[in-house]
Image (cartoon, rainbow, N blue to C red):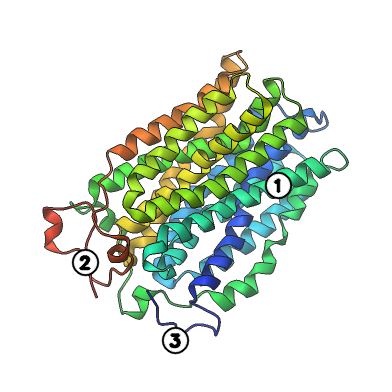
């Protein structure tokens, strides 16, 4: 679907440019997301900071604390004023907050910096998800979203690789300093992202959040919120705690970072393959499968297996843990109409961020109360299983990818009353 971009810059609105920019922005998201997990073992071993396992859980939860605010405000702003300026504000905010983390001198300052970083990071997924969905080719929406969301894994890989290269020789705060550079993306955002969204061009007005609870959408909205809660609890607990859990299971720091690299690469590459299946009409099945794969893979990681097999299983765990995010975002984007898309993503991911807040602390409590080194792996499995079960109750999208992607500019037709799975709309 092409959009009119009369109020945009010369380079704006092109699907390829939009996708490349989305990848760069979510690379930043992934780098920041994984940095806390990457520096975790080093922070715990640096006695000058006085960090404990409980403090690690608190830092992870503080990072997530600002995310619901960022997600909800960005989703609403994205539908009301377009995607461009909210993205600029979020990226600048992340850069400033990462710089503050690099300059922190104690855990309190670091926690405050991470909380404000969370506000910026929380804004990225709904804005980028809506932006990509606005401009993706009709039958490639899930693929474009998976490629963009896969960049989160690439950013996480960069964090792990830099951690392995730098942490033995320099202060862990260097990784936060590197995270202050995304501000250089601002000129690119201003050039590529349209000033108006397609529904604004067609004269539509942004909808109220109450639109999420019309009779045709109420059940799906609640289920999406539960699914995002579970998936984000899984994502944020694994990204913050996987290296620490593996070290406690007897792996060296370098080995745990190698598994983290495999985890993030699996998320990036496997997510694309799953998206190809989703775009062929299997979005619900693929979403359930990704969460189920995560649960099984995390269980296998707790066992003694040959190293090559464990690396492969770690990649599958990443595919399921991070891959489920792009599938759920694609599902939300396909279900709600274009003029409600960013709001639905913002509120859905915003409520889901509560899982991101709870996930790291939940892992902290589980590993503290249960002495078994396998406790962390079992704890990882719980949100994956909850997410898979929840998605099974979601309405199955009945529209083809082409129909869903080309939906137009009016409220759902009355036919929804007999077929509430996907609101229908037309130009």
Which residue is painted at 54% across and 83% down in the image? 9
- Pick whichever of labels 3 and 1 is earlier in the sequence: 3
From where the camera sits, is residue 362 visible? Answer: no
Q: Is residue 52 above or below residue 66?
A: above
Front position in the image: 68 or 280: 280
From where the camera sits, is residue 317 visible? Answer: yes
Front position in the image: 210 or 155: 155
Q: Which quadrant holds the N terminus? A: bottom left
Q: Nearer the viewer, mark 1 or mark 2?
A: 1
- The residue under label 1 is 159
- The residue under label 2 is 411
Q: CA distance from mark 3 to mark 1?
A: 39 Å
Q: Is residue 141 above or below residue 254?
A: below
* Residue neighbourhood size for the residue with mark 2, other residues' Cα within 10 Å, grouped as few (<14), some (14–19), many (≥20): some
Which residue is painted at 57% across and 23% down in the image? 376
Q: CA distance from mark 2 to mark 3?
A: 25 Å
- The residue under label 3 is 6
Q: Nearer the viewer, mark 3 or mark 1?
A: 1
- Look at the numbered disc 1 and give the secondary structure of its residue: helix
């Amino acid at each position: 679907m092409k959009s009119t971009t009369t109020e945009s810059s010369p380079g704006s609105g092109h699907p390829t440019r939009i996708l490349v920019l989305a990848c760069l922005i979510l690379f930043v998201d992934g780098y920041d997301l994984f940095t806390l997990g990457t520096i975790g073992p080093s922070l715990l071993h640096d006695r000058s900071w006085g960090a404990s396992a409980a403090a690690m859980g608190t830092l992870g939860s503080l990072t997530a604390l600002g995310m619901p605010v960022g997600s909800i405000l960005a989703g609403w702003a994205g539908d009301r004023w377009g995607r461009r300026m909210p993205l600029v504000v979020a990226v600048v905010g992340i850069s400033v907050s990462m710089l503050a983390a690099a300059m922190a001198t104690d855990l309190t300052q670091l926690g405050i910096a991470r909380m404000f970083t969370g506000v910026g990071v929380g804004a990225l997924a709904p804005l980028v998800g809506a932006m990509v969905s606005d401009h993706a080719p009709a039958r490639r929406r899930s693929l474009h979203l998976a490629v963009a969301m896969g960049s989160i894994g690439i950013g996480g890989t960069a964090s792990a690789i830099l951690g392995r290269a730098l942490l033995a020789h320099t202060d862990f705060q260097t990784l936060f300093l590197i995270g202050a550079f995304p501000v250089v993306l601002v000129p690119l955002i201003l050039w590529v992202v349209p000033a108006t969204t397609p529904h604004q061009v067609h004269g539509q007005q942004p909808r109220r959040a109450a639109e999420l609870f019309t009779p045709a959408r109420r059940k799906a909205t609640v289920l999406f919120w539960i699914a995002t809660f579970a998936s984000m609890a899984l994502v944020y607990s694994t990204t913050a705690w996987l290296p620490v859990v593996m070290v406690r299971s007897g792996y060296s720091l370098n080995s745990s970072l190698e598994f983290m690299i495999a985890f993030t690469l699996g998320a990036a590459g496997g997510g694309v393959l799953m998206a190809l299946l989703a775009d062929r009409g299997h979005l619900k099945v693929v979403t359930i499968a990704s969460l189920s794969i995560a649960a099984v893979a995390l269980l296998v990681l707790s066992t003694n297996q040959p190293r090559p097999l464990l690396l492969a299983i770690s990649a599958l765990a990443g595919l399921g843990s991070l891959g489920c995010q792009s599938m759920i975002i694609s599902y939300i984007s396909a279900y709600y109409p274009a003029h409600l898309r960013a709001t639905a993503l913002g509120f859905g991911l915003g409520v889901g961020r509560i899982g991101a807040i709870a996930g790291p602390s939940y892992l902290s409590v589980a590993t503290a109360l249960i002495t078994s080194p396998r406790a962390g792996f079992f704890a990882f499995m719980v949100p994956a299983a909850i997410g898979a079960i929840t998605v099974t109750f979601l309405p199955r999208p009945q529209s083809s990818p082409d129909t869903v992607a080309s939906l137009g500019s009016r409220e759902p037709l009355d036919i929804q009353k007999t077929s509430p799975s996907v609101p229908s709309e037309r130009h």
